[in-house]
Amino acid sequence: MAGNTEPLSPRAKLAVTAGKAAAAVSRAAGRGSGSVIGGRVALKLDPDLLGRLAQHLDVILVSATNGKTTTTRLIAEALRAAGPVVSNALGANMPAGITSALAGGSDAKFGVIEVDEKYLAGVARDTTPKAIALLNLSRDQLDRAAETRMMAEHWREGLSGSKAVVIANADDPLVVWAASSSQNVVWVAAGQAWKDDAWSCPSCGGVMQRPGDDWFCGQCGFRRPAPSWALNGDYVLDPHGSAWPIHLQLPGRANKANAASSAAVAAVFGVPPQVALERMYQVQAVAGRYDVVNFQNRELRLLLAKNPAGWLETFSLIDPPPTPVILSVNARGADGTDTSWLWDVDYTQLAGHPIFVLGDRKLDLAVRLEVAGLDFRVCENLDEAVQYAPPGRIEVIANYTAFQDLRRRVGN
């Protein structure tokens, strides 16, 4: 229970100190924030450190295939209305990165933690969260993570018996299946643009019926629960039926959905929707996502898309043709080494845009665009792509490590 905290043991204090030192060395060497190596060192010295650091916090966990970094940031902003917050705001979402983040939050009241889908059950076990937000599940990094039905089962088993309030997307059948083992679920109608991973029933394997926004299994009766919160256009509807306007600096329908889920989380801790949503307006960009930067006298907007569902959402928010678009795809460890997902993305939505292709897997992407019947130019690097792009702001869409490469190149 938050507030019932014991002082850290000498071993835990040593682990925190050593972790911070390792992180500082990593930063000095230019190898990033150091949060992951710092956490690994700390956990090596005290394997139970994550739980010890979380014991005085009201912990909120956020997990999903897409949108968890942004939603974590929105929840953190909303909860600052009720007290100090510690969060892994830069997206280091496995146990080592989470441990590093919490090590800097000794005075915090809330711990708002993004968690990689694969590690959710373990982190929930270690941190005893008060709330868990489950946004969506879709195919992603199939060479590393389980396929979506197996991931939903992993969540379902891991969260069974949890006393946390689970805030879950009622429009994603996989999320509903996962959350249904929990005792206390708040359902949010946040929408689901990408449906190709949820046509079979996660409960019995039958064919899912999806009339309009509803869904149900005709064989076993598994169906969409009645939501108590909902995204309705530019408004969040609360359980009392009141409509609260969403004013975000972040673009797109997906971020309105993230805001709706975030408002539902904040309400669990007594922050009213109006206050929560007003505070979310402060968020302009999230770890570089949506940043507009100047590079070689051109304006570039940086957009992250890691999997088919993410690319679909991103295509919906870019400026219309003839806005130039740069696409960059890598397949390193953090991305998943399997690029077969490119064939699940409907790139024909980019018709009319001048397209420039880069990244480690630019030729894989070029083949996919060729089959889609699109005109494009393969480039060696960002500088070349910007040089050939016609006038106007350039939309830059990249998967995870390609996005980090681009951020470094533009000095962001």
Image (cartoon, helix red, strand yellow):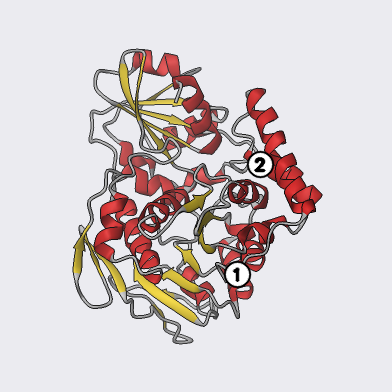
Q: Residue at coordinates 63% horizontally, 75% vertically from top-left?
A: 157
Position of the C terminus, as image quadrant, is top left
Q: Residue at coordinates 30% horizontally, 52% vertically from top-left?
A: 279
Residue toward you, 169 or 77: 77
> Which residue type carries mark 2?
Val
Location of residue 205 in the rendering, given as x and y in whole percent from the top left corner: 54, 76
Q: Which mark is residue 36?
A: 2
Position of the N terminus, as image quadrant, is bottom right
Q: Residues within 10 Å of mark 2 (few under 14, many from 20)?
A: many
Q: Residues within 10 Å of mark 1 (few under 14, many from 20)?
A: few
Residue toward you, 207 or 183: 183
Location of residue 44 in the rendering, given as x and y in whole percent from the top left corner: 79, 48
In the rendered structure, are the residues bearing label 2 and label 1 in contact, judged by CB atoms less than 8 Å apart? Answer: no
Q: Image height check: is 92 above or below 396?
A: below
Residue toward you, 285 or 138: 285
Number of numbered callouts drawn: 2
Q: Residue furthest front?
A: 7
Location of residue 5 in the rendering, given as x and y in whole percent from the top left corner: 63, 65
Residue toward you, 389 or 411: 411
At mark 1, the secondary structure is loop
Whether residue 358 appears in this view of the structure is no
Q: Residue at coordinates 70% horizontally, 28% vertically from top-left?
A: 25
Image quarter for residue 361?
top right
In the drawing, does residue 96 fall left or right of residue 391? right
At mark 2, the secondary structure is helix
Q: Image height check: is 13 above or below 164?
A: above
Image quarter for residue 20?
top right
Q: Which mark is residue 4?
A: 1
Location of residue 161 in the rendering, given as x and y in whole percent from the top left corner: 60, 80
C-alpha span from label 2 to label 1: 28 Å
Mark nearer the viewer, 2 or 1: 1
